[in-house]
Image (cartoon, rainbow, N blue to C red):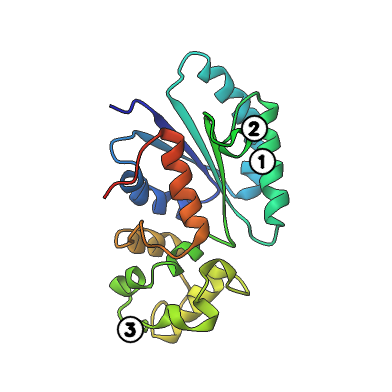
Amino acid sequence: MNTARLDILVEEESAEHLLRVLTPRIVPEVPFEIRRFSGKPALLRELPQRMRGYSQILRFDPTLRVVVLVDRDDDDCVALKAQIEQVVRDSGLSTLTSVGDGWACVATRIAVEELEAWLFGDVEALRQVYPRIPAALDRQARYRDPDAIVGGTWESLERVLQKHGYHPGGLPKIRVAGAVARHMDIEKNRSHSFAQFRDGVRRLVDVERVA
C-alpha cells in the first residue's frame, strides 16, 4: 500500500478546480491537499518560507511529497524552472529534476504557456462540454500543439468558444476548468506539459500508470 501524501501548490483557482478532479485519477488512493495562492507572484514570493516549512515537516513525516505548479505565461520556461528549483534546493529538499533517477520529495512543473493548454490537449473532452466545437480542431495548425499556441491559451480558448456561440460575456475560467476536467483522458492528453505533470506526480509517489 502506498503511504505517500501530496501537497500541490497552485497559483490560482481554476488550477485548483482542475486538479481536484484530475489528481485522484492520476494517483488513485493517494491523499492530497491543494494549496492555492493569490496569483503567481504570491506563490513565488511565499515559496521560500513554504519550502523551509516543508523541510521541517519532512524530518518527522517522510510520507509528504510536494508539487509546485505554475504557468509559464511570458516567462522564459528554463529560467522560471531554475528559479523554483533553486528555492527548493536552498531549503535542503530534493527535486525530481535534481536527483535524476533517485528519490525526491518535490516536483516542480510548468504549465506551458498556461493551464488552458491542458484543455486544448483533449479536444474530445472540450466537445463533451461544448459540442459545437469542431472535432477536427486539434488538426488545425494553430491548435495542433497545445503548448505552442500563440497569443495566450486562455485568450485562444475564449475565442474558440465564443466563435461557436459559448460564453459571449467572457470565459468563466473556473467553471470551464472543472467541467472539462471531468471528461479528460489523462493518458492521451496531447499537451506535453500535462504529460510532464502527470508522470512527475506518479514518479514522486511511486505509482505506476493505471490501465
Task: Say if 44 sits above or below 134 in the image.
Answer: above
Q: Is 134 on the left or on the right of 42, as rendered?
A: left
Identify the secondary structure beneath mark 1: helix
Task: Say if 60 sits above or below 115 in the image.
Answer: above
How would you rate the neighbour count of disc 2 (Cα within 10 Å): few for under 14, some for 14-19, many for 20 or more? many
Task: Say if 206 sits above or below 23 in the image.
Answer: above
Image disc number at residue 178: none
How would you rate the neighbour count of disc 1 (Cα within 10 Å): few for under 14, some for 14-19, many for 20 or more? some
Residue that appears at 64% across and 28% down: 49
Q: Position of residue 165 (x, y in %)?
A: 38, 85
Q: Mark 3 or mark 1, which is nearer the start of the sequence?
A: 1
Say what amino acid the circle numbered 1 marks: Ile
Say what amino acid the circle numbered 2 marks: Val
- The residue at which mark 3 appears reads as 132
Report if the CB atoms under discs 2 and 1 are less than 8 Å apart: yes
Regarding residue 79, the answer to whether it shows in the image is yes
Image disc number at residue 84: 1
Q: Position of residue 75 (x, y in %)?
A: 70, 57
